[in-house]
Image (tube, helix red, strand yellow):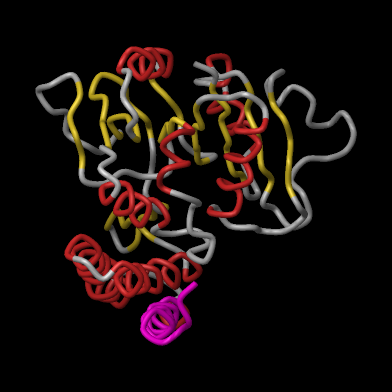
Amino acid sequence: MKICAVVVVYNPDKKELAENLATYAQDVDTLIVWDNTPDGAFGPGQEDKGILPANALLMGENRNAGLGYVFNVAARYAAANGFTHLLTMDQDSRWKNFRGFRDFVARSGTESIFTPLLSYEERGDAESEPRRQYINSGALYPLRVIERIGDFNEDFFIDAIDKEYGIRARKKGIAIMRYNVCRLVHQLGYHRSIGGHDVNCYSAFRLYYLNRNCIKMFRKQRDAASLRECLFYFKQFALKRGWQIVRYEDRKLSKLSAIARGVFSGLFSRLR
């Protein structure tokens, strides 16, 4: 088992990033740190020495390339260099016992998409269990699985890439397996205390893609699974989120406008 990991960073808090990378870097063979910061987050000199682990490979194109494109580049790099698995990570995620997760995947002997128990999820009774969906961060893919499913959706740019990929995986008969013994500490959106309420917020940028992509996912797949995901996303990120923005959040106009533009683009933009 030879793992190539890829973590996508954008204007990272470098101290936090170094701490997060330290929870898994030593248990992968190569760690691609892809810098999506347009001007570059890492200086050419010695000021960032010590932040990245010894097995890190810094990549980027001086632009925000999204996630789908980066995952595809990393998958091709892994295939060309003799790796067997690809691990995808967010910059703000940290592992509890990644080595245990890695060893579980190694002994499973199955061609599945593997995912850990997330910090906000309830643990099941079994050591592992099949799941309907997963998130990008913490997902470990055998490269043979990626070959069977195909490329990650680059048109989606950032959101719902995992949901659309999971639907395509199930159509190919590929299971999504969650290992309940290992946790990934992961936060959805960002939290703010507004008017005495602890509110989970998303930027206008994210709200646009969340709403756009859930609709495009259904238009592309046109099946019961994609319809279920589309309706769930629309309820969570258009209806409920719109009400929360009106009541509690700042930048109301830009966020509500992003939701509306996302829905319109999802309905009428060209499918790729």
Up-down: is 40 above or below 142?
Answer: below
Residue 181: percent from left, percent from top: 25, 19
- What residue is drawn where x is 32% and y is 49%? 166
| Horizontal side, residue 58 vs residue 180: left or right | right
Up-down: is 152 above or below 123?
Answer: below
Residue 79: percent from left, percent from top: 60, 33
Residue 75 sits in quarter: top right
Up-down: is 85 above or below 171?
Answer: above
Residue 133: percent from left, percent from top: 26, 46
Which stretch did the figure color magenta?
Answer: 255-272
Total labels: the figure holds 0
| Horizontal side, residue 155 vs residue 125: left or right | right
Residue 14: percent from left, percent from top: 65, 35
Q: Is residue 258 magenta?
A: yes
| Horizontal side, residue 2 vs residue 253: left or right | right
Which residue appears farthest toward the left when viewing the image? 125
- What residue is drawn where x is 57% and y is 14%? 26
Which residue appears farthest toward the right when viewing the image? 45
Up-down: is 132 above or below 265?
Answer: above
- What residue is drawn where x is 23% and y is 24%? 180
Taking depth in this image into account, of 186 and 142 the one nearest to the observer is 142
Q: Please identify the dominant SS of the magenta region.
A: helix
Q: Is residue 244 magenta?
A: no
Taking depth in this image into account, of 55 and 49 the one nearest to the observer is 55
- What residue is drawn where x is 23% and y is 75%? 239
